[in-house]
Image (cartoon, grey):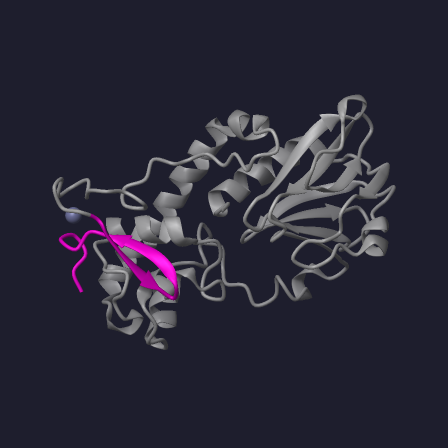
């Protein structure tokens, strides 16, 4: 499943190809996604020029020259975006949407159909985007902010940092990595962790994500060439799905369920 660094990489990939380009035609090949694609609304973007490509959490936003008109894309579990020259494009299985530009097409392909494509005139108020917490790489996500949010919650720290209303874009993989680096047990109650520990955790979240984003940039070619497969690159990870702790070499990594999600940690590094 694409996490924030992967989505950031896809965003950059799309940005470099569609900025200031006009949509000449649109084909909805299969509107069945997590929510059906609104054929009429997506049609409103025809003949419009893309003036900005941004990311909010795990959503990619294509913004148009018409004020506020925005396509909001979520890649779900297996969504990918690829480009083809118009003359070379042949419909493939699981292609859902095709945007035609001058010389090439942008295609959204999604095998498992958990992704979504919406069109809105009011992105800040759109149901998927409003209420989202700050970006983890932004200044708004800091120790004071997270400590304050934690104090009001009795959930586990892992659930806290994966709550999109608290902070966006931290999924299962990077939650595990950041907690390991911070020596915090994933089940620790959010309101029982010291401010000092939250300072370390915030620093590690930012570090883990920025490292993953920079690595994502270097492997973009593999992603692009992933012919129909969700070819998301694998990062160098420390605990997620690992067998042994990189510090305590013979200590097996534990795997417990928190909110139904596998949670990997080292019981020597991360004590309750
Ligand atoms: Zn360890």
Is 8 displayed left or right of 180 in the figure?
Answer: right
| Horizontal and vertical percent position of residue 187 | 27, 65
Q: Which residues are magenta?
A: 253-272
Q: Tell which residue pokes out farthest to the front in this image.
A: 93
Residue drawn at 82 percent across, 38 percent down: 23
Location of residue 222 with respect to 50 vertically, above or below: above
Q: Is residue 235 left or right of residue 62?
A: left
Residue 210 at x, y percent in the picture: 41, 41
Q: Give the residue at x 71% y 37%.
A: 107
Q: Nearer the viewer, residue 31 or 206?
A: 31
Res 19 visible: no
**193 relative to 46, above or below:** below
Toward the viewer: 101 or 136? Answer: 101
Q: Quadrant of residue 247?
A: top left
> On the rendered structure, is 173 left or right of 75?
left
Q: Is 226 within the magenta? A: no
The vertical placement of 188 against 170, above or below, is below
Residue 104 is drawn in which quadrant? Answer: top right
Q: How many numbered dots are placed on residues in this image?
A: 0
Residue 265 among those drawn in magenta: yes
Q: Residue at x 32, y 52 (%)?
A: 176
Q: Tell me residue 33's x, y (percent).
A: 68, 54
Quadrant placement of the C terminus: bottom left
- Would you place residue 56 above or below residue 209 in this image? below
Residue 11 position, x and y percent, is 59, 40
């Amino acid at each position: 499943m694409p996490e924030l660094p992967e989505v950031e990489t896809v965003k950059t990939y799309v940005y470099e190809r569609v900025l200031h380009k006009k949509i000449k035609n649109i084909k909805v090949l299969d509107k069945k996604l997590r929510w059906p694609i609104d054929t009429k609304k997506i049609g409103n973007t025809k003949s419009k020029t893309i003036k900005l490509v941004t990311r909010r959490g795990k959503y990619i936003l294509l913004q148009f020259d018409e004020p506020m008109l925005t396509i909001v894309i979520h890649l779900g579990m297996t969504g990918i975006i690829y480009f083809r020259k118009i003359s070379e494009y042949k419909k493939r299985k699981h292609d859902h949407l095709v945007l035609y530009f001058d010389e090439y097409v942008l295609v959204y392909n999604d095998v498992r159909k958990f992704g979504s494509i919406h069109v809105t005139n009011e992105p800040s108020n759109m149901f998927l985007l409003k209420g989202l917490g700050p970006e983890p790489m932004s200044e708004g996500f800091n120790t004071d902010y997270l400590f304050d949010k934690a104090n009001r919650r009795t959930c586990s720290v892992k659930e806290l940092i994966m709550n999109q209303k608290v902070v966006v874009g931290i999924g299962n993989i990077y939650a595990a990595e950041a907690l390991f680096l911070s020596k915090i047990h994933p089940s620790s109650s959010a309101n029982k962790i010291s401010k000092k520990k939250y300072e370390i955790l915030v620093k590690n979240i930012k570090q883990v994500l920025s490292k993953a984003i920079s690595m994502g940039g270097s492997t973009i070619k593999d992603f692009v060439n992933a012919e129909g497969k969700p070819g998301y690159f694998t990062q160098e990870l420390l605990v997620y799905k690992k067998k042994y702790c990189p510090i305590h070499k013979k200590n097996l990594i534990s795997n417990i369920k928190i909110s139904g999600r596998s949670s990997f940690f080292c019981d020597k590094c991360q004590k309750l």
